[in-house]
Amino acid sequence: MWLPARGTLICPLSALDEKPARSFILRGDQEAQEIDLILWRADDSVLAYVNQCPHLHLPLETMPDRLLNRAQTALLCSAHGAQFDRTGHCFVGPCAGDRLKRLDVAIVEATNAAGHVVKNIVLNGRLELAGDEPLG
């Protein structure tokens, strides 16, 4: 599995202002270098997961950025109704007990071209399961 370099810019934090969970695709220089991920803003932090349900390995959403249940307390797989808490653990659905793959991200401040300080979400570390098993 291809992994972006540490420090890779994903998006500005403000991209999660209207929808607290969104999907993003990061691409590398070669055709096969691609990763589809979910960012989920939770209070003052951002959680990131590979956008792939452990049940059938499909993306969680069938409609763009429709990733949360109605209460907005869990990620929802639209294919079979699996729900995942903020740790990535599936607590409802056909993959109950499984986990999403987590990506470590950070919120960093930067100065834009106009001289304003903005907050961005960047890759901070390696991809791993929401437990301890490294994937790359």
Image: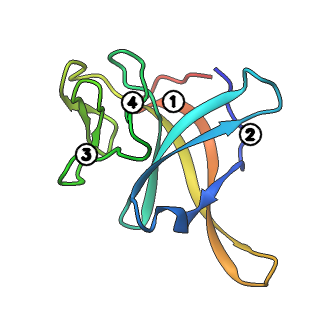
Q: Residue 24 sits in which quadrant?
A: top right
Residue located at (37% from left, 32% from top): 60
Q: Which of the 4 image quarters holds residue 129? A: top left
The residue lying at 23 percent from left, 51 percent from top is: 73
Quickly name the residue at label 1: 128
Residue displayed at 20% across by 23% down: 96
Q: Earlier in the sequence, mark 1 or mark 2?
A: 2
**Label 2 SS:** loop
SS assignment at label 3: loop
Label 2 crowd (10 A; few <14 / some 14-19 / many >=20): few
Q: Amino acid at mark 2?
A: Ala
For the residues marked 3 and 2, what is the alpha-carbon distance in whole angstroms? Answer: 28 Å
How far apart are the two marked residues, 4 and 3, measured between alpha carbons? 12 Å
Residue neighbourhood size for the residue with mark 1, other residues' Cα within 10 Å, grouped as few (<14), some (14–19), many (≥20): some
Q: Which mark is residue 5?
A: 2
Labels 1 and 3: the sequence-earlier one? 3
4 vs 3, front mark: 3
Q: CA distance from mark 1 to mark 2?
A: 15 Å
In space, the residues marked 1 and 4 are separated at their CA atoms by 9 Å
Name the disc covering residue 100, or none.
4
State which tag comes first along the sequence, 4 or 3: 3
Q: Quadrant of the N terminus?
A: top right
